Image (cartoon, helix red, strand yellow):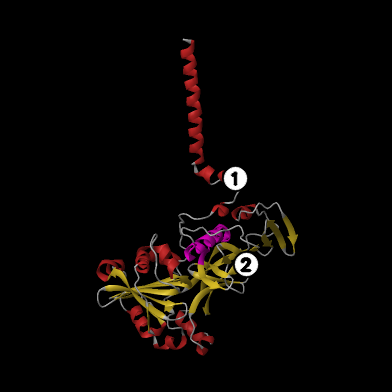
Amino acid sequence: MKGKRRYLEWGKNLAIVLLSLSAAWLLTMTPLVRDSGLLSHGVPAAENAGSGAVTLTAAAYPCRMAINTPEGRYGVQYNQAQVDSLFARVGPLLGEALTSAGQSEAVDEAQWQACLQGEGIYFDFSGQIPLSALGSWLHPGGGCPLSGSARRLVLAQREDGRVALSYQEASGVFFACTTDLSVDLHLDPAVEGVEENGARFAFEDGELARLLDPYTLITEEASGTVYAASTPISANADLSGLLEALSFNGQNHTSVSGGEAYLEGESRLEVRNDGTVLYRAAREGKYPVAHSGEESTLAEMIETVRKLAEDTVGARCGDARLHLISAAQTQDGWQIRFGYQLSGSSVWLYEDGWAAQFLVRDGYVAEFTLRFRSYSTTGEQEPLLSMERAAAMLPALTLERRELVLQYRDQGEGEVAPIWVAQ
């Protein structure tokens, strides 16, 4: 009996040990522990990035769109909710077109304008977006064979019943290519039920064509929202949240002119009183680009810095949101810029316009500059001239045809209101 009792006790102890190990393993799989950093042994998540599956998140979205049907054109801009709703409906078609694109060929401006006027869908991303990255965002798992960057793209009906993808490359040259989409199966169902609202391009209006860039989209706008603006951080404030987001421990720091500098290894982070944050790495740095293949793609570079931007300036910008302005290769590496947007209009910040700038070199983020600003609606509306009247009253447009856009100019003051800008 004693031996049997001893075996029973031993079995109970073994069961307790196994249950404890099982519970400990399940605990490690909970979001609370996974996200706490306890499993990384003190190494920031960015430093663990390497080869493996990479989830890409869209860093750009159109600020204006137009749909041409046999009944007329519907165009929308300066209302991000309406643009987002329309893009959610037809955006997947652009992803399919990009990933199934054939060989692109240069076309003349007359052919490009014919695409804008025939049945189709027009997208304007405001910034120059790498086509390879755009295809990866809109059609996960698919590869876009097109190179270069574009701001304006259009899915247009062809005479053979197929859908062509046309775009204006960053150089200004127009291109067109075939896609696997058909008018009957893809384009017609996507635009069905859309009602025209009188939107037009400047080149379709004799008077406006004389004053404006031909691809200025003309819609009816009467007013714009006024926002209160502020700087949400300073070197003298509690920076624990920012340092955590950037994986800096904050222990080694010193006062510098106009702010505070934090040192970690060969990386330096400087927080200035005006809300500017600068990072410089002497060598590889803290932020490697996660990649699925042997080398990181441009889309993966953008994803790495997008995450940094969203966790920092994006988390503190209030009613604004970030959008990709450009990704360009320079002699120092890839320079990637993001800007703020309000109500579908870009915010031109200080002298250069952008809110965040990153330099990616040799698989790492070597430098970045962040400009923190926060915006909240005041409930006030700013009366605006119609686009036609604004175009006629801006003398600069008579010297050179430029695009007329609604924009917020933020020079660090306490309030921003939309104005018409010739750019």
Pinpoint residue 214: horizontal percent, then vertical percent: 43, 83
* Helix, strand or loop for disc 1: loop
Above or below: residue 188 compared with residue 269: below
**Quick check: marks 2 and 1 in contact, CB under 8 Å?**
no
User: Would residue 181 be found to the left or right of residue 87 on screen?
Assistant: left
Q: Which residue is denoted by mark 2 in the rendering?
A: 414
Look at the image and give the residue range highlighted in magenta. Answer: 295-323
* Helix, strand or loop for disc 2: loop
> What residue lies at 48% left-to-right and 86% top-to-bottom?
401
Q: Residues within 10 Å of mark 2 (few under 14, many from 20)?
A: few
**Amino acid of disc 2:** Gly
Quadrant of the image occupied by residue 136 = bottom left
Pinpoint residue 336: horizontal percent, then vertical percent: 54, 68
Q: Which residue is denoted by mark 1 in the rendering?
A: 41
- Note whether residue 241 is visible: yes
Quadrant of the image occupied by residue 310 = bottom right
> What residue lies at 44% left-to-right and 79% top-to-bottom?
216
Does the magenta portion include 67?
A: no
Pick the residue in front: 211 or 378.
211
Q: CA distance from mark 2 to mark 1?
A: 44 Å
